[in-house]
Amino acid sequence: MNTAAHLLADAPAQLLPARELMAFTLASHIILVPLGVALPFITLVMHYRGLRKDDPVALLLARRWSAVMAVQFAIGIVTGTVLSLEFGLLWPGMMGRWGDVFGLGFGVEAWAFFLEAILIAIYLYGWRRLKPRTHFWLGVPMPFVALMGAFGIIAANSWMNTPQGFTLDASGKPVNVNVQQAIFTPMFGPQYWHFAVAMFLTAGYVVAGVYAVGWLRGRRDRYHRLGFTVPFTVAAILTPVQFVLGDNIARQIYHKQPVKFAAAELVWETDTHVPEYLFGRLQEDGTIKGGLKIPQLDSILAGFSPDTQVTGLTSVPASDRPTATQATIAHWAFDIMALVGSVLILLALWYAWCWFRHRDLPRSRWFFRCASLAGVASVITVECGWITTEVGRQPWIVYENMRVSEAVTPTAASSLWTMFGLVVAVYVLVFGAFLAVVLKMRTRWRLADAGSARALAEGPEADTPYGPRPEPAVGGPGPRRAPGSEL
């Protein structure tokens, strides 16, 4: 029997469905996170532009984005609540033993969640009801509260990767908890800034991608131009920053979690002059099939010298490291993330070159084709980042202190599989409803733009968020709805 089969045979039957359920809900929730964290900031940037330049197009975009922000937040309530419940239901061993050490992070996230809900409600209510600048300044705290929520989640996750801030008594229970140390672990800074910038970058590309599609379909008005330019500029500025942060966190993992680094880079034996493999599959005997081998590059990337020693997977027993399959999954996720990041840098440079040289958007349709896909690609990199983080840490749920198998619920595997099926069905309905609502809002906005007499003459910027609404065109739609009713 090979090593992977032996480890699988020793695992509790309920471990596989518990992990699959957690992976599915986390992967689903994280699709919404970039918009939840960064869309308030992008909306406020557009809002500020509208106020500073007295630009009705920018104000209209900001108001419409705030409506999408509200719908996304409502869906995030569902997926986030499910995740919170699963920590206790699926992993009672971890929460029971370690909750007092790292639980403050979840507490911070919960407070940020409720505060963000209040701020979003005030911001939505303020359109047409508050003075423009008062309304804007009431919305300014939203991005900071969103970042505070991310602070709590990353604090908890970074503690799971590099646990500290406690001592163990004779029975193995944590005592003498130091909350400050438990929050600010060695991996907290690199993880937090890498994650935060990823959220802003991804949200920028996702929002810009919507208007890139419109541009490709011939909608070349100022509404689509501005809707593309502002979020894409935010993303383009942050793309090279994220590349540097990504390189930094990889090097921090090399120093603080060497076995995870070995898994992500498919390093079997501890050695110097270690080659870099682009993709490829690790075998149980340590050989690598497929992929592109670049001699010495892994040592150079880790320590800026081919003489840098890189710790291999065999430096620890097989039971304390990811299996060959898990290492391959982490490696592919890491390589996809790096590859997409490199392509996005080229796209950002293309945009910057055209802007600084001509003060205009690139004219090539290929640019807008790439820009329309950048949002999806960015979401994929976010998923890959979490896969690398979580799969590369296996078999530990609390690194070097508790295994995943020790934390899993005693609930029967059949019950967990049933729960998994129900959750999948519910999530299909929830995300289907989200898509239907967003598409319905898009259709309503287009009808509103087409039905206004001023819109017909001047474009969609006629329906401004402040002041009286324009009268509908003769023979057009009926009276406008009350302020905020489009939500």
Image (cartoon, rainbow, N blue to C red):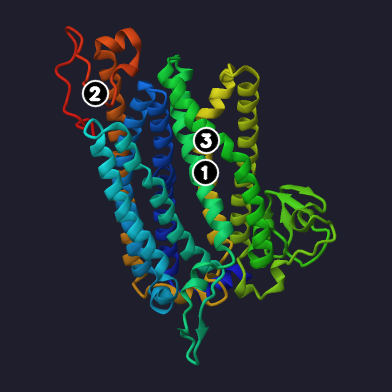
Disc 2, disc 3: CB below 8 Å? no
x and y percent of residue 303 in the render?
77, 58
Dot label at residue 467: 2
Say which amino acid is labelled 3: Val
Above or below — where is 1 with respect to 110?
A: below
Say which amino acid is labelled 1: Ile
Identify the residue under disc 1.
380
Query: In which quadrant is the C terminus drawn?
Result: top left
CA distance for labels 3 and 1: 19 Å
Above or below — where is 393 with respect to 465?
A: below
- Does dot 3 land on a helix, a strand or a loop? helix
Q: Residues within 10 Å of mark 1 (few under 14, many from 20)?
A: some
Give the label, 3 or 1, closer to the camera. Answer: 3
The reply to whether residue 164 is visible in this rendering is yes
Identify the residue under disc 3.
234
Q: Is residue 371 found left or right of 25 in the rendered image?
A: right
Give the label, 2 or 3, closer to the camera. Answer: 2
